[in-house]
Amino acid sequence: MASPEVRKAISEAALKYVKPEGKVFEYGTAGFRMKADLLNTVVFAVGLLAGLRSKKLNGQWIGVMVTASHNPAEDNGVKLIDPMGEMLEAEWETYATKLANSPLESIGDAYDELIKEIDVKMDNPARVVFARDTRASGSRLVGVLNAALTATEVEFSDLKYLTTPQLHYVVRCKNTLGTQYEYGEPTEQGYYEKLAEAFKKVTKGVKIQGSLTVDCANGVGGPKLKELVKYLPSAAEGGIDIKIVNDNVINPDSLNFECGADYVKTKQRAPPSSKAGVLDRCASLDGDADRLVYYFVDEGNVFRLLDGDRIATLAASFIGDLARSAGIAQKLKIGVVQTAYANGSSTDYIEKVLKLPAVCTNTGVKHLHHAALRFDVGVYFEANGHGTITFSENALKVIKSSEPQSPAQQHALDCLNGLTDLINQAVGDALSDMLLVEVILAHKNWGPKEWLATYTDLPSRLVRVEVADRSIFKAYDAERKLESPPGLQAKIDSLQSRYNKGRSFARASGTEDAVRVYAEAASRSEADDLATRVANAVREAGAVKEIVQS
Ligand code: NG1
Ligand code: ZN
């Protein structure tokens, strides 16, 4: 039980907020995310829970990130980060949901009930570190977080503005400091130094050609990339010639507006502001810099997207080659983890050309991350550009302790070693992923055209369908099939069988009030047609249910 002082402080602090009437909150794949003005009481609840999570884990640091990623400027969100920089353990998502929905008048009781249910030792210390993206509502929400942590006597550190992956990095560093798993200096500067050091190691002997234009979605990635550039070698010294665009964090409305990774991926076009020339490498981050996509304009003036699937295949092929050159391929189990949104051609390429296992999981990086941990080297990316690579303890041991038999083996081992530092193993990180792509392209001596030539994407279409109640859409088989509403899956199966290389599925979004329909097929018109037909079937099934319910 909380002490009477803490109970009193919670009640007094909670009085300042008003819970939006009739709104049910749910901790989803991206934490809580919605219109920023609805979030006060949710953030308050998350603050209370963060302290409990830390106490439960004997005072390890827990992270709280205030961001709504690629959502519009008027939204915001909040999510918890576990000690190793990973997403919050699934069981605790239900506690977060419970606390966020508890009436304010009795939030102290709900807090005490949770302490009992989770069996938290209240004498343990509690430590929380938090940060936010550049949204205007962030400072108010951080104030709410501060109030919850103060009321519950939690030690906390406010790191102001950070990218989401930077906070994940700091959390992992803080909790591994002084142990054999030490991950780096637990500061923003430590993050830049670690990346820059690793970048120098892996670019030894290679030259990075041309320039890279980075669209920062007018989010926190802009100022942070500018900072990172200060630590990297200049183009003249063998570094990357980085041109930063869409880095306006002064006008809050410009965030993610007609720019950023989500815009580029979903619209399949460059931001209208783009001035890139033919074959220029371009990249887009999202609003909190955990997603990355590349693109370019080819000689025929056609826009070409290089999405998360492309980054995954590029990285898997490079690491596979390095492991072979280093003579350690037999000792490392390398695998790629994707979701159902991965283009079918990328999966074929992984299995048939790279000859690596490809695993499909539910949407949401936490699912991919866990599946990746089953490999020695687990490459995981969502098609939208969110992902990273994990190295098992065995992989690190093999890479660090193998005796090279030749200069070529030495070079490959050094490069692999550098990669384990360059890659943010806690979470998908657009800045780290960007350096990784640049390094690989330089090693392979490839421009974006050669990268694109590895395989040909099947034309695909993603449609958002609004239905009365998305919760009736229940999926299974890594969300590739629907068990409810009844009859819908059979309809989708029958539709997709009519198209050459047709594949389609529908699932309820975890972050928006909608059902998403994905379709791919051998030609653009077939993919569009299949998507339209499946979307109609979803709309009908949703509407039928609505009538049944009323
Ligand atoms: P939902 O809304 O559940 O489809 C979206 C993305 C996920 C993931 C989460 C979290 C797609 C199709 N879906 O989830 O991949 O990134 O947001 O941000 O891109
Ligand atoms: Zn994001």
Image (cartoon, rainbow, N blue to C red):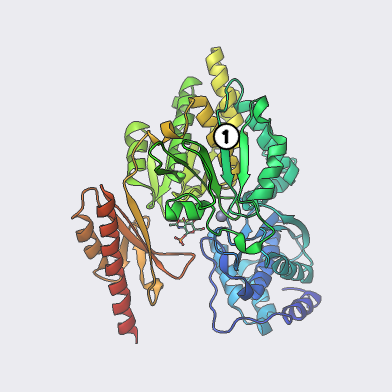
Comparing 228 with 429, the one in front is: 228
Task: Check disc 1 and report the residue beneath it.
Answer: 211
Query: In the rendered image of this protein, does residue 383 appear above or below residue 181?
Result: below
- Name which residue type carries label 1: Ser
How many C-alpha atoms fall within 10 Å of the one at disc 1: few (<14), some, or many (≥20)? Answer: some
Where in the figure is residue 496, as x and y percent of width and height?
Answer: 23, 56
Decide if residue 464 is on the left or right side of residue 167: left
Decide if residue 150 is on the left or right side of residue 413: right
Comparing 79 with 125, the one in front is: 79
Q: Does the beta carbon at disc 1 come under 8 Å from ligand 2?
A: no
Whether residue 186 is visible to the viewer of this picture, yes or no, is no
Where in the figure is residue 87, as x and y percent of width and height?
Answer: 57, 55
Quarter assignment of residue 321: top left
Question: Considering the image in quadrants, where does the C terminus appear?
Answer: bottom left
Residue at the extreme bottom of the image, as rendered: 550
Q: How many numbered marks, from 0 up?
A: 1
Comparing 491 with 401, the one in front is: 491
Residue at the extreme top of the image, as rendered: 406
Question: Considering the image in quadrants, where does the N terminus appear?
Answer: bottom right
> At x 62% / y 71%, what residue is drawn?
36
> At x 19% / y 55%, what residue is drawn?
497
SS at mark 1 in the image? strand
Query: In the rendered image of this protein, does residue 98 appear above or below residue 246?
Result: below
Quarter assignment of residue 350: top left
> At x 62% / y 34%, what residue is drawn?
241
Where in the figure is residue 524, as x and y percent of width and height?
Answer: 29, 51
Decide if residue 150 is on the left or right side of residue 37: right
Comparing 245 with 333, the one in front is: 245
Where in the figure is residue 192, as x and y percent of width and height?
Answer: 70, 40
Whether residue 259 is visible to the viewer of this picture, yes or no, is yes
> At x 31% / y 72%, what residue is drawn?
539
Query: In the rendered image of this protein, does residue 316 appear above or below residue 471?
Result: above
